[in-house]
Amino acid sequence: MGERRRAMLLMATFAVLWAAIDALEGILLQRYSLYQVLWGRFAVHLAVMLAVWGWRQPRLLWATRRPLFQFARSSLMLGMGISWIGGLQSGMDSTTLLCVFWLSPLLILLLSWMFWRERITAVFSIATLCAACGAFALHPPGQLATVSLLAWPLAMALCFSLYVVMTRSLRTEGTTSNLFYAALGVVLALTPAMPGLWVMPEPLDVLVFCVIGGLGLVALYALERMVAAAPVSVSAPFAYLQIVATAAIASMAGQESQYSTRRLFVGLLLIVGAALYLWLRESRLSVPAATTARTAQ
């Protein structure tokens, strides 16, 4: 498998895990604040890393040449949560928030061009736009009391996009330390607020917290490997598969779809079609390249 296809597959893996995490967090948010859920998720993330590496090779956890950059990137994870809460508390509905948030893969293309001078081909731009249309079909915007409210979902989209691009900047650092600082920044920022927000988890909820933390660690590992495999513009359109995974999880859980059949069909067709086209196109392009390499040998 070529590096570009590996990056696509890793982003798809991240998207599916992201959907699973969101579904499990939805269970916890019925009883706990989002801040406690975020703190618990990343606390488990840290605990797993300390248990695996802390007693054998602790230096792998904290060794980095760019600590300030690491903490700045970690703050974007918290920024996403704050933006989501701020948008909901200001009166925006979740569909409108998601409609704007799903500009993020397009922002990844723009930021990767600005900071990394990645060459964005017309094929990837068009495929990403098609997938974005699918996302907007499933999350149509509602009415806004004021345009200024768009600052919340735009901030959320920018936080995610910058996180991906900044992760690309850290690909020369150790993956272990990148994952460690990604969680450490969130835990340090939220710990002072926990005494006032803390609700003692029930035993079953502790298990859900542990599962979310473990899945979150694996998801961020997939993202780390993705940016190391290929330019982020290659895999950006595959982030939209999170919407497909969310719809599949809701269907398996027996939840009634919030979308009409036509809207669901059009949205998923555009997203899956764009991802499948890019995957098959990359497969076709890799065959001549491999043949040329063997001929040259």
Image (cartoon, rainbow, N blue to C red):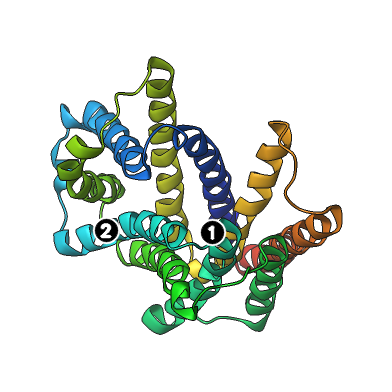
Q: Nearer the viewer, residue 241 or 41?
A: 41
Q: What residue type is labelled 1?
A: Glu
Q: Which quarter of the figure is the C terminus placed in?
A: bottom right
- Residue 140, image x and y in percent? 68, 66
**Which residue is identified by label 1?**
3
Label 1, residues with CA under 10 Å away: few <14, some 14-19, many ≥20: few
Label 2, secondary structure: give it: helix
- Residue 44, image x and y in percent? 31, 32
Circles 1 and 2, Cβ within 8 Å, touching? The answer is no
- Residue 243, image x and y in percent? 64, 53
Residue 36 horizontal side relative to residue 20, left or right: left
Image quadrant assignment for residue 284: bottom right
- Distance from the alpha carbon under mark 1 to that under mark 2: 29 Å
Whether residue 231 is visible, yes or no, is no
Whether residue 116 is visible, yes or no, is yes
Label 1, secondary structure: give it: helix
Q: What residue type is labelled 2?
A: Ser
Residue 93 horizontal side relative to residue 179, left or right: right
**Which residue is identified by label 2?**
75
**Above-or-below relation of 234 to 80:** below
> Residue at horizontal 61%, vertical 81%?
121
Residue 26 horizontal side relative to residue 170, left or right: right
> Residue at horizontal 26%, vertical 33%?
198
Q: Which of marks 1 and 2 is in front?
A: 2
Q: Nearer the viewer, residue 265 or 83?
A: 83
> Residue at horizontal 23%, vertical 49%?
181
**Above-or-below relation of 233 to 32:** below
**Above-or-below relation of 174 to 208:** below
Image quadrant assignment for residue 191: top left
Ranked by sequence position, the earlier of labels 1 and 2 is 1
Image quadrant assignment for residue 48: top left
